[in-house]
Image (spheres, rainbow, N blue to C red):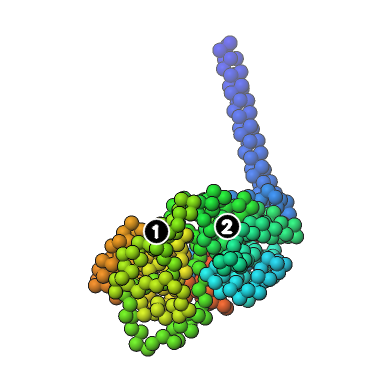
Amino acid sequence: MRLLQYNTRHNRNAEKSNFCSRFIKWILWFSLSFYFFGSFLITRNKPTTSISRNTFSQTKASRALIEESYPNSSLLQHAQNPQDILKRMKVYVYDLPSKYNTDWLSNERCSSHLFASEVAIHKILMNNNDVRTLDPWEADFFYVPVYVSCNFSIVNGFPAIGHARSLISSAIQLVSSEFPFWNQSRGSDHVFVASHDFGSCFHTLEDVAMADGVPEFLRNSIILQTFGVKYKHPCQEVENVVIPPYVSPESVRTTLKKSPLNGRRDILAFFRGKMELHPKNVSGRFYSKRVRTQIWQKYGSDRRFYLRRQRFAGYQFEILRSTFCLCPLGWAPWSPRIVESVVLGCVPVIVADDIRLPFPSAVPWAEISLTVAEKDVARLGDILEHVAATNLTSIQRKLWDPNVRNALLFNDPMVEGDATWQIMVALSHKLDRSHKMARSFNQ
C-alpha cells in the first residue's frame, strides 16, 4: 500500500516536473524569439541620423557599405571599364586663396618644370566635370591644391622648399576650420602632391629629409609623390601613389612632329646633364653616389656613348636619335629622363637601386627598360652591346606602344589611360579611406 502511494506520488511529481520543464523551455523559446524579432525591427527602423560622425569607424562593415555603393565592377577592385571611375568616383577640389597656388604662376617655369605635376593635376581636375564635383558632400576624396615647388632660388634657380611645411599646414588649418571634412576623416581622404626630391619630407638632401620625416599633419593623408623606393624609408611612411615627374605633353608632341621621317637612331647610349668630375662631400653624401662620375670617367671618350655635361634646349631631338638613354640617379633616385626616354622611344637604362616606378599596372617597366645595378655601372658598355645584339627589337616593340607613352603624360584635358587617369585608378583602390558613407548616414 505504501509502495502504491509512493509510486502514485512519484508519478504525479514526475508529471509536474515534466510539465515545468516543458513550460520553462516554451518560455525560453518565446523570449528568444521575441528578442530576435524585436532586434530585427529596431535595426530595420533605426534612423540613420543616430550614427555619429565622430564615432564612425572604417571597419569591414563600412567597407562592405562602400562596396555596396559601387556595384558591378567595384571601384575597390581594378576597374575594367574606365568610365566606371569617371562616373562613380568624385573628387572635390578646395578653392583655396590664390596665395597657395595660382599666385606662383607669375613665374612661367612654375607650370613647366620637372616638379610641375602639382600645377598640372590641379588644372586638369578643375577642367574635368566627370571626376570633379562641386558638392563636397558627394565627394570620395578632397584635393588640396598647394604649390610648394615654385619658389625658385635667386642664387641658383632651383626650387627652394623650405616654406613647404608651413604653407601646407596653413592650408590644412584653413580647410579644417571652414569645412567639416578634414576633421571627420582626420585627413585620410585628402590628397596632396609632393613632386620634389623626397616627397612629403620636404628637403632636397636625403639625410635631412629622413631625419625630419613626413610632417605629423600629413601622416594620415594620401600623397602623390615622385619619390618611391622598394625598402622602408621615412619619406614614404604615408599612404602614397608614385607619379611620374612632369614632362610637357606639348613639347613631346612638337618634338615628334619635327622628328626625321626615317626615325634613324644613330646614337647607342645618350646622356646629357650634370656629371661632376670631382663630386663634393655634402653631409657625408656624394651627388649621384658618384655613379655619374664613374660613367663619365669610364665612357667619356667612348665613341659608343654620347655624353654631354652642358644644357641644350634641343636635347629631346638627341633622345630621338638614341637607342639607349641613361637615367642614373641624382640626389634622388627618380629622374624626368625616365619619362622623356619612354615617350620619345629611347630605351631607358635605369641606374638607381630599388627605385619604385610609377603606375606599374599600366607600364610594363621590366619589358620596356633596362635596370643596371649601381655597382655594375663599369660594365655598362658590355651590357648595352649584349642587349642590342639579342632582345632589343622586342623591348622597342613594347616601348613604342602608344598606351605606355600616354600613361606617363599629364594631358589637359585628361584622356583615358594618361597620368591623371592612372592617379584616379590608384585612388579608386583607396576608397576604404573615404568617409563619404559616414556623411551619407548623417545627412
Residue at horizontal 48%, vertical 82%?
253
Is residue 179 depicted above or below 56 in this figure?
below
User: What residue did someone put label 1 on?
Assistant: 290
**In the image, is residue 398 above or below residue 224?**
below
Quadrant of the image containing the N terminus = top right
The residue indicated by pointer 2 is 202
| Residue at (35, 66) in percent of width and height | 296
- SS under mark 1: helix
Q: Reading the chain from its start, which is encountered first: label 2 or label 1?
A: 2
Q: Using the rendered view, name the quadrant where residue 171 is placed.
A: bottom right
Q: Residue at x 67, y 46 (%)?
A: 39
Query: Are the two marked residues, 2 and 1, in contact with CB atoms closer than 8 angstroms?
Result: no
Image coords of residue 388 (percent x, y): 27, 72
Q: CA distance from mark 2 to mark 1?
A: 23 Å
User: Residue at position x 56%, y 66% from top?
Assistant: 156
- In what element is the residue under mark 2? loop
Q: Position of residue 439 (x, y in %)?
A: 69, 58
> Hey, what amino acid is under mark 2?
Phe
| Residue 193 in the figure: left or right of residue 100 | left
Q: Nearer the viewer, residue 266 or 62?
A: 266
Q: Is residue 288 left or right of residue 241?
A: left
